Amino acid sequence: MSNEVIILGAGIGGLTLALSLHQAGIPCRVYEAVPELKPLGVGINLLPHAVRELTELGLLPALDKVGVRTQEAVFFTEHGQLIFREAAGQHAGYDWPQFSIHRGDLQTVLYEETLKRLGPDSVVCNRRCTGATQDADGVTVHFADTTDNAHVPPVRGAVVVGCDGIHSALRKQLYPNEGAPRYSGINMWRGTTRWKPFLSGGSMVRAGWLAVGKMVIYPIRDDIDDEGNQLVNWVAEIHAPQPALRDWSRAGRLEDFLPAFADWHFDWLDVPALIRASDTILEYPMVDQDPLPRWTHGRLTLLGDAAHPMVPRGSNGAGQAIIDARFLAGALKDMGVGPAALEAYDSVRVKATTEVVLTNRSNPPDAILREVFERSGGQRFEKIEDVVPTAELQAISDNYKRVAGYDPVALKARPSFL
């Protein structure tokens, strides 16, 4: 009987799982639907709990070459007034840094390392999963050629892990009546801009609030030219009716969102100028799914966005996928490649990520902005302490660290998954 793990999807979760299984001495292969892997997406943040896992995979030097070590998380009003700031990563006493990084750069690091360590045939592109069937001895996964929809030979393995994103074929097979992703009521416009460093040069900024417009801004590449510019990622968020089309590569239009930020000329950043200077603008609906009761069904399980798509309000989607992958690899190493390990993974990670998904909806770190906006009525203030005590803002941040699994004391004390 084969003990190979079949991985569906060569995104961050799938490639991290492949590298982790290789580290654990477990054979695997990755099957990806797109004909060719290209570095897509915009900026993401890797919090210390995720960077710990990538460091254990020996990837820290590669991350340093392409990402920016985040120095601080800082919150401002829509008037540019400072609300709250705290150090990030090793600047906050963690054993591991926090990175702001282009999603495509991270995926490229993981992909290149997978090919290097597992071999050139370890990732097979142009294979769209059409279903999986299991029996007492293993699982058979069926594929079609993505380019021409032609049938291709099925693949046999011990277990299959769906790492194939929010539109997961395996999730749809397991939960056929679930329906489309749930719209949060918030639309996002995202872009990247070549810009001079601002604040610390490694600051992750959240500003404003959804009632008037909210921005998330941080650098994701350093020294991109001879003038010392950075590549700066920005996200504009506004309450909006559900878009007619949920197209994740849809081009955004300035006139649909720039007016909300037209007066955001702060002494530390000219926000409308930053937006206008963007290379490209994409428009995304902010969506998630209600948590599932279980991901594992015998020899089939889910991971990352296929398992727990979450609204991006805690900088935690990629991080939770990475932790899923490491935990699952550890369970398969300890218990053998079979249903028992998948059940052990399910029993821990479903509960943990359900709490993150629901907290991202109600009380993520940017709840700091909500509290200040609601209590100040969106008006300027003399001192933030007159609006919200700093200790209360710190408590919001600390609670999210606990929920998401990167409380500094607990993270340092936790044994390695592998």
Image (tube, grey):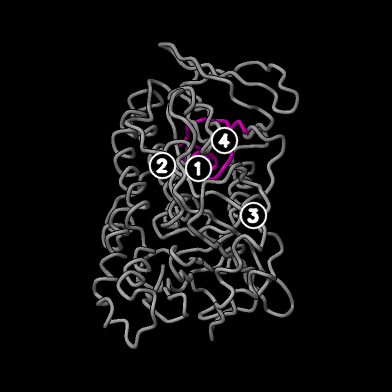
The CA distance from mark 2 to mark 3 is 28 Å
Q: Could you tell me if the residues under marks 1 and 2 are in contact, i.e. CB atoms within 8 Å?
A: yes
Residue with the mark numbered 2: 324
Residue with the mark numbered 1: 13
**Element marked by disc 4:** loop
The CA distance from mark 1 to mark 3 is 23 Å
Which residue is nearer to you in this view: 48 or 25? 48
Measuring from the top left, give residue 414's x and y in whole percent.
Answer: 29, 53
Instruction: Give the amino acid type for the residue marked by disc 1 in the picture.
Output: Gly
Q: Could you tell me if the residues under marks 1 and 4 are in contact, i.e. CB atoms within 8 Å?
A: yes
Instruction: Give the amino acid type for the residue marked by disc 4 in the picture.
Output: Gly
Q: Give the numbered dot on residue 282.
A: 3
Q: Could you tell me if the residues under marks 4 and 3 are in contact, i.e. CB atoms within 8 Å?
A: no
Which residue is nearer to you in this view: 184 or 360? 184
Residue with the mark numbered 4: 9
**Dot placed on the residue nearer the N-terminal end, 2 or 4:** 4
Q: Residue at x 57, y 42 (%)?
A: 11
Instruction: Give the amino acid type for the residue marked by disc 2 in the picture.
Output: Asp
**Dot placed on the residue nearer the N-terminal end, 1 or 3:** 1
**Dot placed on the residue nearer the N-terminal end, 4 or 3:** 4
Magenta region, residue range: 10-32
Magenta span has 184? no
Q: Quadrant of the C terminus?
A: top left
Q: Residue at x 65, y 49 (%)?
A: 40
Q: Residues within 10 Å of mark 4 (few under 14, many from 20)?
A: many
Measuring from the top left, give residue 343's x and y in whole percent.
Answer: 32, 28
Give the image quarter of residue 76: bottom left
Q: Could you tell me if the residues under marks 2 and 3 are in contact, i.e. CB atoms within 8 Å?
A: no
